[in-house]
Every structure is written in C-alpha cells, then in structure tokens.
Amino acid sequence: RRLELPSGCLEPVLPVPISQSRRKPVRGFSRFTLGSIDVFTTWQGSVVYGFVMLFSLVAINRQQQTLARQNSLALEPVRANLQVIASAPVTSESEISSSLEGLRPLEQARQRLPQDWLNGVATSVNPNDGVLQLLFNEPSQLKIDSEGGDRVQLAAGEGQLTLQLRAPIDLTMTPPPEKIQQVMWNGVPLKQVPKRVGVYRVEKSSL
C-alpha cells in the first residue's frame, strides 16, 4: 500500500505463509524405503537389519564348519610336544649353519669363484647347437631343415656358407659336393646318408 503497487504483484517473491508450509507427518510404510537415509529410523528398517545380521552369522558359521570338515581350518591351537623337544639332541652351531646354506643364495653367490660362473654357463648350453659350414665349388641348390625352426632354400654360387643351427638337421645339396670336406658340422666332416646322394643329416644328441 505504501509503494502504491498493484495488489498481488509481490506474491511470487514473498515467502510462503507458515500455515501453508506445515506438512502432515508421514506415518506407516510410506517412510520405509531402502534407498532412503531414514531406513534405520523405522521399525521396519530395524527388522530388516536384524534379519541381515542373523543371516550373515548363520552363513559364516556354516562356512567355518565346512572348512573344519575339509581340514582347512584348525579349531584348536597347535600344541607342541614338550617331551620330544626336551629329549631331542642338542645341535651345534656348525650343524645349524650347514643346514641353512641352501637358504642363503646371495651369500653363496658371493663365495663363488669366477671359474664356477663359467662352468655354470657352459652347462646351460644346448648340446644340440652347432655350426654348419658349407663350401661351394660350383653353383648349387641348397635346402636345410633344422629342429630350431630354420628353413633355408636357396641357390648358391661359389663360396662358403656358415650357419648356426640346432640338431636334428636335414641337408640336401644339388649337385652333391665332390669332396667330403665341403660339408662340416662343428669342424667335423659329415657323411652322406647311405643310398641318398647329396643328402646329409645331423642326429640329435643323446645328452
């Protein structure tokens, strides 16, 4: 009235009257919703919570009984036999240290000599690995199959070919070499397969 404004023009910005803002209290199951934060403030939520706890205790008890029947769970503490411990012979410090040598790999590595490391590397080499040397005096066709997955098929001219392969190896040269020294395995001349001209084979080692 003082600002001489039309009646009702300020209703959208004025607060709601207290008489209209009061709401009726919610009762019954309308307050019970699992996604609501008030779920534990109702008696229905307390009943559900108690049921969940009871079900969890029964399930854990059944699981423990099953593990005990499978010998996966001990229901009693492990008891030491004091009579056996008292009657056991006393071991010296030297015997204890000798029994613990296998549990100290770093200390063993420090005590190893250089030749021990070389021997360890030498024993790890595959006995089937070797070097194949071929000498060509004329153009030839070459075909090689090895255990290591190597597959060679080529036409070679005059010269020498050196390959590192793994036995067993099948080698075919066409035409066959004239001299036995033209095909060597680890420095040893190879002989042709009987009744098969130009065919060589390196057998797998039995070591």
Image: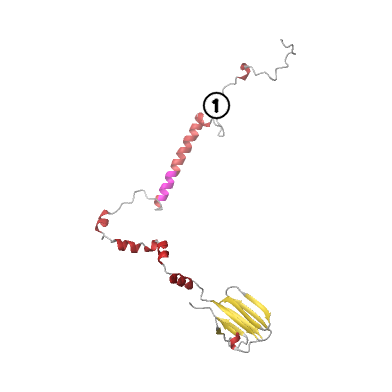
Q: Residue at horizontal 65%, vertical 83%?
A: 159
Task: Tell me the quarter of the picture where residue 199 sits.
Answer: bottom right
56 on left or right of 5: left
73 on left or right of 47: left
Residue that carries the numbered disc 1 in the rendered image: 28
Position in image of residue 6 (x %, y %): 75, 13
- Comparing 203 with 179, the one in front is 179
Vertical order, 170 against 180 (above or below): above
Q: Residue at horizontal 56%, vertical 28%?
A: 31
Colouring method of the image: secondary structure
- Which quadrant of the rendered structure holds the N terminus? top right
Vertical order, 36 against 56 (above or below): above
93 on left or right of 29: left
- Region rendered in magenta: 60-67
Vertical order, 20 against 136 (above or below): above
Position in image of residue 145 (x %, y %): 61, 77
Magenta stretch contains residue 85? no
Count up the numbered dots.
Answer: 1
- Comparing 153 with 133, the one in front is 133
The residue type indicated by label 1 comes to: Gly
Vertical order, 73 against 36 (above or below): below
Q: Residue at horizontal 50%, vertical 34%?
A: 48
Position in image of residue 74 (x %, y %): 37, 50
Magenta stretch contains residue 61? yes
166 on left or right of 137: left
Q: Which element type, helix, strand or loop, lies under badge 1?
A: helix
- State the predominant SS element of the stretch in magenta: helix
Position in image of residue 163 (x %, y %): 60, 77
Q: Residue furthest front?
A: 114
Within-10-Å neighbours for mark 1: few <14, some 14–19, many 20+: few
- Comparing 58 with 185, the one in front is 185
